[in-house]
Image (cartoon, helix red, strand yellow):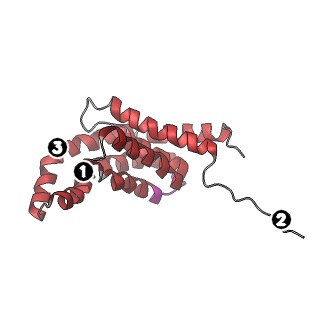
Amino acid sequence: MSLPTQRAKPFLTPFELVIFAVLGALMYCSKIIMEWAPNIHLLGMFTMTYTLVFRAKGLIPIYVYVFLNGLFSGFAVWWIPYLYLWAILWGVTMLLPKKMPDKIAAFVYPVVCGLHGIAFGTLYAPAQALLFGFSFKQTLAWIASGFPFDVIHGVSNVCAGLLILPLTKLIRKLDKGAYRGK
């Protein structure tokens, strides 16, 4: 007599593999399209949107983007902080309440996105200090010299962040109607 075997459910369905690859590529393409405008992009908006829709699995398209960025622009020293910078925004987004009322979310999402943008240089600084042997004073000077660009980054992230709530709703609606291989 043999025992019935249960087939383990895969972590990702083939559908999710494709969707996450496309979403990560969309992040990368949006970055390339926006390169003409320094520190103005849609990456924070996409990071938060993917996290709100896919929760923990939202890291997959985010790291597809990070990998593509390194692949096409070079796995150089500048790329190393990308291994944690987007995970910080993902983590903060994961801590937000799941059932936040729309009126509050419409305010909170852009603010969180903007704060990540304004803090980007400060979050990037520890890697710079370790990789280039900066002293604490040099690290502070590096942060201060980049602060005007961080302000631009923060303001543009707030503007892009206005799209998070409607895009999250759209993706959830489309996801409900999609073939998920179930």
> Where, by quadrant of the figure, is residue 3 drawn?
bottom right
Number of numbered discs visible in the structure rendering: 3
Q: Nearer the viewer, residue 22 or 49?
A: 22
Residue at 50% x, 57% y: name it: 97
Q: Secondary structure at mark 1?
A: helix
| Residue 66 marker | none
Q: Which residue is mark 3?
A: 148
Q: Which residue is mark 1?
A: 77
Residue at 33% x, 50% y: name it: 82
Q: Looking at the image, is mark 1 or mark 3 earlier in the sequence?
A: 1
What amino acid type should be assigned to the residue bearing mark 1? Val
Which residue range is magenta in the image?
A: 94-100
What amino acid type should be assigned to the residue bearing mark 2? Pro
Q: Residue 130: image x %, image y %?
A: 20, 61
Question: What is the C-alpha distance between the residues marked 2 and 1?
Answer: 52 Å
Residue at 52% x, 56% y: name it: 56
Question: What is the C-alpha distance between the residues marked 1 and 3?
Answer: 22 Å
Q: Is residue 67 visible?
A: yes
- Majority secondary structure of the magenta segment? loop
Q: Secondary structure at mark 2?
A: loop
